[in-house]
Amino acid sequence: MDLSYAVERLIRSLNLTSFPCGPGNWRNEHLEEYDVQIDDHTDGHQESVSALRGYCEGLKMPWYTDSEWSSEACSLKELSVRSPHVLTDPHMIYKHFKTLRVISKKVTAIDEGILKFTNLRELVLGVNSIAAVDGNNLPRSLEILELCGNSISDLSLLCCDTPPDLLHLGLSHNIVSNVTCLQPDQWSHLLSLDLSYNQITSLSETTSVLCKLPELRTLVLMGNPISLVAVYRAYIISAIPHLTYLDEVQILSDDRTLCSNFSLSVEDDDQTAVTLSITLLTLRGIPCHSDEQNIQDGVRIRKVDYTYHVEYVFLPDELDDRMIQLPDIQYKTDEVTWSESISLKYTKEHTSNLLLRCRDHMHRGINFCIMESQVVSLPPASNEPETKRLPPDSEKKTKASQGASAKRTPTPGKKEKDKGTDKSPKDKKEKEVKQKGKNAPDCTVDWVKQPAEKRRLAQVKMVLDDLLTGHGQTTVEQHMEVLIPKAITLIQTNDEQLSNEREENCSEEETSTHVVMLSVKADLKRHPLIQKLH
């Protein structure tokens, strides 16, 4: 959609020739202005001028129209009621406008039709789909041009024939990568320049161009990849001494003094190595597992060891914010055992010379996963088939029958007197106890560890946009709370019987949630001088 077409639609929405505006037969200019109420009617249903104006100004009136798109819209509609004959010439309507704010109207181009607005001072075209701006199609009277939130990458067409009195140029949230076309002969009156959140990666090239703009006082570059460079703010203050505001922060005289002796020799690709340090501090709120299911009849049947760690990854472009499927984990902490407050003691520095990639990673954020590892250990006897034990009464009957058969069939070669050599009942009982001990788990033997099972308890996203503001902030520390279901704290095992018991015993309390808090700190390496600036 062309800009002129979008503006014409907005003008038509004012209904300048329909009731209560325009030179219609509903007007009676001879009526006393204060003698007639807004709703009073005279012969022929004519209204006074004051009544017609009330229809236009009332917020609840059906003739009220939104006028936020221009500061002159209300005055133009009032003029159409008070002196409608003035607006019979369409050019008078165009000349009336000094401000136009066409925001989020799917405008794709600034066409030459906008040149009809000869008195236009301010043009705001935010959040549209403009890819290029032709300076020849901009009114010569323009002083403020705001183009934030578009798809502009090349400024060459804009610089061909720039309005001579342009004071502010806003290009934030576009895809501009260089500003070499901003020459001082065409931008001699420019006071304010907003290039925040673009793709500018060369600090020395950018400052070498902007320092030549004689009237430039306000500059916004935060959110660009160059804002991550360690010497960013000090370098710009030193390279452009006539600046008053940088990234919406005033440059004081003390700042100029500190940066006056700052070296302007930025070598090695603008010293673009970005160092981001990630520190994982503590993990609180992990529930403690119950040991009751590992003991039966007072005998431990298994050992379960739990350890915890945190994995994190810088989110790529294609990953959805919902984080349903995660990419391969790149970094992780050491395994630690459970405690009420787990000290992770993890710090890692990430260094890269790819400024644009680093900026995008910080904007999309880091995904942290809280992981649990479970290792089940079984006694060696549990791997052998278990022998069925008879009830105590059955054992007595069996022993009695065995004794009777022994009497009926004496051992050959033995005399009756040899019976006295048999063991006493007490000795037999001790032998049975020893035999039973062979089948019971022995705490002194080594337990057989099963393969470790890992599961993700929770995940949380940390965004590092605060490090992109360029205000000198170097640390972002967050205490992030996440919820994990209590049900996952129950032991997972291949034993179907135990699994069924777990499902049957899962109460409503166990399906509620725990609050887990992860403390993370991100530090962006800056030049020591940056910490002294305001």
Image (cartoon, rainbow, N blue to C red):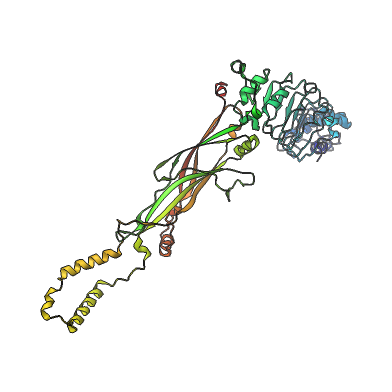
Residue 16 appears at what percent x and percent y? 82, 35
Vertical placement of residue 498 versus 509, above or below: below
Q: Residue furthest right?
A: 89
Vertical placement of residue 207 versus 291, above or below: above
Instruction: Give the left or right position of residue 262, taking residue 456 as reference.
Output: right
User: Does the rendering let one see residue 38?
Assistant: no
Vertical placement of residue 516 versus 231, above or below: below
How many marks the image carries: the answer is 0
Q: Quadrant of the C terminus?
A: top right
Residue 475 appears at what percent x and percent y? 53, 31
Residue 375 appears at what percent x and percent y? 42, 54
Depth check: 288 or 19 in front?
Answer: 288
Depth check: 180 or 4 in front?
Answer: 180
Q: Quadrant of the N terminus?
A: top right
Instruction: Give the left or right position of residue 111, taking residue 504 as reference.
Output: right
Give the image quarter of residue 130.
top right
Residue 243 appears at what percent x and percent y? 67, 20
Residue occupying image coordinates x 59% and y 28%: 230
Q: Residue furthest bottom?
A: 408
Residue occupying image coordinates x 50% and y 47%: 458
Give the image quarter of residue 432.
bottom left
Depth check: 52 or 13 in front?
Answer: 13
Q: Residue furthest front?
A: 413
Instruction: Give the left or right position of residue 482, taking residue 352 as reference.
Output: left
User: Does the rendering let one see residue 460?
Assistant: yes
Depth check: 227 or 126 in front?
Answer: 227
